[in-house]
Amino acid sequence: MDYRTLSNEELEQHFNPRVAATNVDEKIAAMGTRSTDVRAVYTHTANLSYGDAPGETLDVFHSGKHGGDAPVQLFIHGGYWRAMDKSNYSFVAPPFVDRGGVVVVINYDLAPSVTLDEIVEQCARSVVWTHRNITRFGGDPSRIYLSGNSAGGHLVGMLIARDWADDGLPTDVIKGAAPVTGVMDCRPVLKISVNEDVRLDAAMAERQSPVDHPPRQTDLPLIVAVGGAEPAGWVELSRAYVRACEQAGLKPRYMEMPGMDHFDMSAAFGDADSPLTQAILRQMGLLEG
């Protein structure tokens, strides 16, 4: 569908997941409970600073071994850049740690205290920190993968469009990525209530829209996933991004998961039996097939 033709009221229905989905508070609470349980059981190092700002912290889930050869999954949480916290997403770690991976779950400062431009830069600093420090936790800095849900999916999209040489890192520092149910075009946000906090303007929306900035690495393994029960406009964000990537020479894997809404897609990260999680595990070389 062409979401550019929607009225402001229709845009709110299509691009505000809290309006479109049901049982939202219960689903978010369940993810929080799962995360608390994970932190009680899994070895992790919490609240490491990757920069100077208050929100620039991360948690590392690891096996306790220090071989330095484990693939690394860096996860960026959603919340429309204005809500949620890494502590809500510890539940993503077990499927990866159980198979020998290291998981980094990051925070960033939230709108309206910072702009989207600054949030993207903060997330980039988390990648720099991970590349320089992850061997302390058994991770391999040459095997860093990115994933994120919703706003986190958007942030993944912007990071894989980045020229990492400007940060002093190898241009292929990211070995694979999975933006999941992401805000891959920011322009609809300009006309919905969320923007009261995010404060996008037209120039920033264009500058920070992954659909206009496909990945630099044309050979990057890329999974783009969205829920089949999400509004048609939201689904089109991921479809449009896939088309843009294909036009840029990439071969993304598109996954539209039947019956799943926006918050079901987020919850799927922690399910080892989910087709989404299994696809990411395969991308990292942690699952055969």
Image: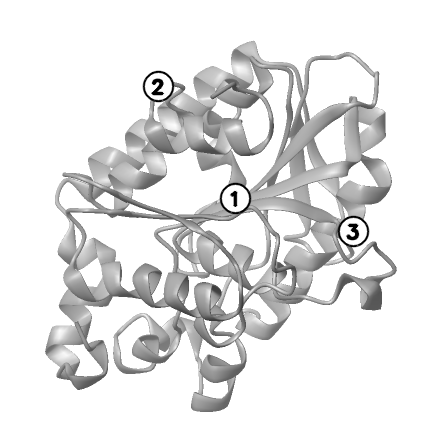
Q: Residue 33 lies in what quarter of the image?
A: top left
Give residue 262's position: percent from left, percent from top: 26, 47
| Mark 2 residue element | loop
Give residue 40's position: percent from left, percent from top: 53, 13
Looking at the image, residue 207 lies above or below residue 74:
below
Q: Residue at x 54, y 55 (%)?
A: 156
Q: Residue at x 78, y 51 (%)?
A: 128
Give residue 113's position: percent from left, percent from top: 55, 69
Q: Is residue 185 left or right of residue 121?
A: left
Q: Can residue 235 be seen in this view?
A: yes
Q: How far apart are marks 1 and 3 (CA)?
A: 16 Å
Q: Residue at x 60, y 51 (%)?
A: 220
- Which residue position holds label 1? 147
Q: How far apart are marks 2 and 1 (CA)?
A: 17 Å
Amino acid on which the number 3 mark rests in the picture: Val
- Which residue position holds label 2? 273
Amino acid on which the number 1 mark rests in the picture: Ser
Q: Is residue 77 visible?
A: no
Q: Earlier in the sequence, mark 3 or mark 2?
A: 3
- Which residue position holds label 3? 128
Amino acid on which the number 2 mark rests in the picture: Asp
